[in-house]
Amino acid sequence: MSPPTEAQWEYAARAGSREARYGRIEDIAWYKDNSGDRPKGVGEKTPNAWKLYDMLGNAWEWTADWYGETYYQAKESRDPQGPPRGTYRGLRGGAWFVSRESIRVSVRGSNPPEDRHLTFGFRCAGD
């Protein structure tokens, strides 16, 4: 198992929705205004339509893709791939310390893959 690609992560987070969030932010995510300045346990908020918890907020989630500034300009409309190499890996979902405006399915972050921080987590994806 490995982390999902950015496209796989976004597909799973949206769970069929085209909205910026899959529910009311207070119901689905820990972020700056409601986290008490610390991460929370998994599964304490409402899951998305596919029963996936914590897709938004609480911890940034690593993706398998190298980060590319022009990711949303890719020619592929289905399952676009990140660059073949890079310095940073993509992060998705936001975290407990970010503003409510940054808690959206489309928000992207990046860091070198060797970085470790209490705001980073991961989600495994299988075939």
Image (cartoon, rainbow, N blue to C red):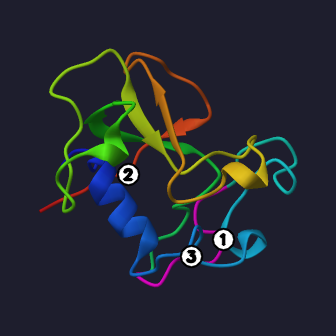
Of 50 and 7, the residue lying toward us: 7
Q: Is residue 67 above or below residue 8?
A: above
User: What is the residue that sits farthest to the left in this orientation?
Assistant: 127
Q: Is residue 37 left or right of residue 22?
A: right
The structure residue drawn at horizontal position 55% and vertical position 77%, both measured from the top left corner, is 47
Instruction: Give the prevailing secondary structure in the magenta stretch.
Output: loop
Residue 10 numbered mark, or none: none
Q: What is the C-alpha distance between the residues marked 2 and 3?
A: 18 Å
Residue 82 position within the rendered picture, expressed as x and y whole percent measured from the top left: 24, 37
Q: Is residue 120 above or below residue 72?
A: above
- Closer mark to the observer between disc 2 and disc 3: 3
Circle 1/circle 3 CB separation < 8 Å: yes
> Which residue carries the number 1 mark?
28
Residue 119 position within the rendered picture, expressed as x and y whole percent measured from the top left: 61, 35
Q: Amino acid at mark 2?
A: Arg
Magenta region, residue range: 41-50
